[in-house]
Amino acid sequence: MLLHGPPAETGVADPGRGAIAEGDMVIVYERPDSMKAATVHSAAMFNNRFDHFSMKNWVGKAFGCRVTGSRGGWVYLLRPTPELWTKVLSHRTQILYVADISMVAACLELSPGSVVLESGTGSGSLTTA
């Protein structure tokens, strides 16, 4: 299956998807094995080994858009989801992965509307699932 990304510098956000705003958390997709979480501040820069990106250019863009840096490099700005959040966390020994979370939810017979109390001092990966 061939996946096509959105066009570069997509401009105005689709009202159904929402626009990136000052203070929003975005997942910066650099390549399949490299994603980072970033909080958008219009006075800040996001730097990686590919390019330098001014966050002021991110405000008002649609989640999922591709943005270009000062030297022509590009990244995608994704809306945080529980799965993406788990992928951008540094994986320590106690992290729960998607397969683990699925097993816990299945064994507890959770369904929409279930009330679950979770406590701990970990990453919060299960809480966001």
Image (cartoon, rainbow, N blue to C red):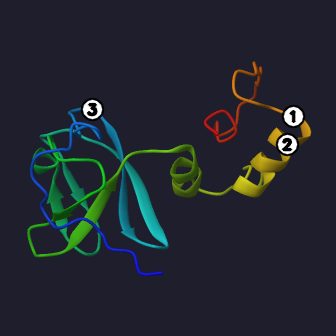
Between the C-alphas of marks 3 and 2, the distance is: 35 Å
Whether the residues at callouts 2 and 1 have beta carbons within 8 Å, the answer is: yes
| Mark 1 Cα shell of 10 Å, populated few (<14), some (14-19), many (≥20) | few
User: Which residue shows up at 21% across the image and 37% down it?
Assistant: 15
Q: Amino acid at mark 2?
A: Ala
Q: Amino acid at mark 3?
A: Gly
Q: Quadrant of residue 36?
A: bottom left
Can you identify the residue that label 1 sits on?
A: 109
Q: Earlier in the sequence, mark 3 or mark 1?
A: 3
- Residue 19 badge: none
Q: Is residue 101 above or below residue 91?
A: above
Foreground disc of the pair 3, 1: 1
What is the x, y in percent for residue 73? 19, 74
Q: Is residue 119 left or right of residue 74?
A: right
What is the x, y in percent for residue 53? 17, 59
Between the C-alphas of marks 2 and 1, the distance is: 5 Å
Q: Is residue 91 left or right of residue 47?
A: right
Q: Amino acid at mark 1?
A: Glu
Q: Is residue 33 above or below residue 62?
A: below
| Mark 2 Cα shell of 10 Å, populated few (<14), some (14-19), many (≥20) | few
Can you identify the residue that label 2 sits on?
A: 106
Q: Judging from the image, what secondary structure is the residue with disc 1 in?
A: loop
- Residue 23 badge: 3
Whether the residues at callouts 3 and 2 have beta carbons within 8 Å, the answer is: no
User: Which residue shows up at 77% across the image and 22% down it?
Assistant: 116
Q: Judging from the image, what secondary structure is the residue with disc 3 in?
A: loop
Give the number of callouts: 3
Q: Judging from the image, what secondary structure is the residue with disc 2 in?
A: helix
Between the C-alphas of marks 3 and 1, the distance is: 36 Å
Q: Is residue 64 above or below residue 24?
A: below
Q: Is residue 19 left or right of residue 43?
A: right
What is the x, y in percent for residue 105? 81, 39
